[in-house]
Amino acid sequence: MKKHFIAEMLMALAVIGGEVPYAVAAPPPQMNAPASGQSLYMRLGGYDALVAVTKDFITRLATDPQLGKFFTGLNDTSKARVEDHVIDFLCVATGGPCIYTGQDMKTAHTGLHITEADWNSSAAHLTETLNKFKVPQKEQDEVMAAIGGLKGDIVGR
Ligand code: HEM
């Protein structure tokens, strides 16, 4: 909810100032929603739902015997930063009113050497998370399609 407020304040300031600030990365949800209905972000349940889903997903990755190695060596502040960035990234990617200030996906994952097998286990974890939160199949397919498009930037770098 807080992020909506900040985004709205930035847009309000932009209107007062007569120009769009460079920091506004995504328009408000009603502008970004498909003409036929709500954005994927809204259908997933909005900001609080996205936070809960992302935390569950990251915890699964970080505690997986095969994938945990990627998250060792990050101090608590770095872990919190990554988590915040993943939330904001997914918010923007699903049409939400957030601002993503992290690295692009290629830069963020270059040097990690994430393999195809790592990717497949991560996708399985994401499905478990989405099932846990009872996300309907249509929305699950849309999330997977959005994430699938990032594979080339994340795997084998
Ligand atoms: C499912 C698609 C994925 C998305 C949308 C995603 C998104 C992100 C984002 C937004 C960041 C933060 C970048 C920053 O702080 O500037 C990040 C960092 C990171 N990601 Fe991913 N990621 C994905 C898949 C993966 C996978 C499969 C792994 C490994 C199993 C992984 C491991 C990491 C690690 C270790 C970092 C921290 C890098 C660092 O700051 O040192 N990610 N990811």
Image: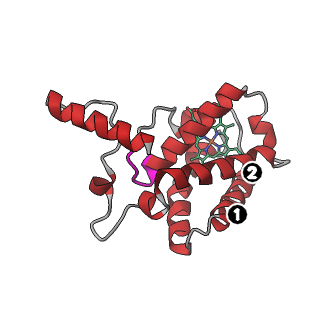
Classify 81 as above or below 114.
above
For the point 50% across and 65% down, which residue is it?
142
Secondary structure at numbered mark 1: helix
Label 1 amino acid? Glu
- Measured Cα–Cα span from mark 1 to mark 2: 9 Å
User: For ligand 1, which image quadrant applies?
Assistant: top right
Contact between marks 1 and 2 (CB within 8 A): the answer is yes
Label whose residue precedes the other's in the sequence (1 or 2): 2
Q: Which mark is residue 60?
A: 2
- The amino acid marked with disc number 2 is Arg
Q: Quadrant of residue 32?
A: bottom left
Vertical position of residue 136 compared to residue 89: above or below: below
Q: Residue at x 49, y 62 (%)?
A: 44
Q: Circle 1 is placed at which residue position?
A: 128
136 to the left or right of 24: right
Q: Which residues are magenta?
A: 92-97
Q: Residue 149 got which mark?
A: none
Vertical arrangement, residue 105 with respect to residue 123, above or below: above
